Image (cartoon, grey):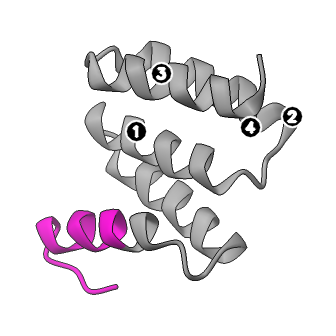
Amino acid sequence: MTPSQRIAAAIGLFNSQRYPEALAQVAGLLEGDGANVDALNLAAACMRALGRADEAEHYWRLALAREPRHAASWNNLGILLQQAGRAA
């Protein structure tokens, strides 16, 4: 499977609320390409959905360190921090 296909498969799992499976799919992708910002963003979203906010924040910050203009990561991190009563 190509990286794009793996992301698409993980998104499908995420949208079906199969978060652990989506996370496993993304983790496999990140093993081969730890700089894949879309995979980092999706890993963070999975972590958040699983109630692991600290890990979600970590993944979003990694994504933004690699691609500072990644709008989806900024948006998701902002929502996470706002819900926690914190500032970005």
Q: Bin the neighbour count of mark 3 within 10 Å (Cα to Cα): few under 14, some 14-19, many 20 and up.
A: many
Side of 24 relative to 30 (left or right): left
Q: Earlier in the sequence, mark 1 or mark 3?
A: 3
Q: How far apart are marks 1 and 4 (CA)?
A: 14 Å
Foreground of the two, 68 or 53:
68
* Position of residue 46 measured from the top left corner of the image (x, y, whole percent): 39, 35
Kindly identify the residue that appears in the image at 36 percent across and 25 percent down: 14
Foreground of the two, 61 or 84:
61
| Quadrant that contains the C terminus | bottom left
* Position of residue 19 measured from the top left corner of the image (x, y, whole percent): 37, 21
Q: Does the magenta stretch include residue 77?
A: yes
Q: Earlier in the sequence, mark 3 or mark 2?
A: 3
Q: Do the CB atoms of the residues marked 3 and 2 lie less than 8 Å apart?
A: no
* Position of residue 73 measured from the top left corner of the image (x, y, whole percent): 44, 65
Magenta span: predominant SS is helix
Relative to 4, say whether 72 is above or below: below
Kindly identify the residue that appears in the image at 32 percent across and 70 percent down: 75
Relative to 3, say whether 53 is above or below: below
* SS class, disc 3: helix
Q: Which residue was labeled with disc 4?
A: 30
Q: Do the CB atoms of the residues marked 2 and 4 lie less than 8 Å apart?
A: yes
Relative to 51, say whether 85 is above or below: below
Kindly identify the residue that appears in the image at 66 percent across and 74 percent down: 67
Q: Which label was assigned to residue 47?
A: 1
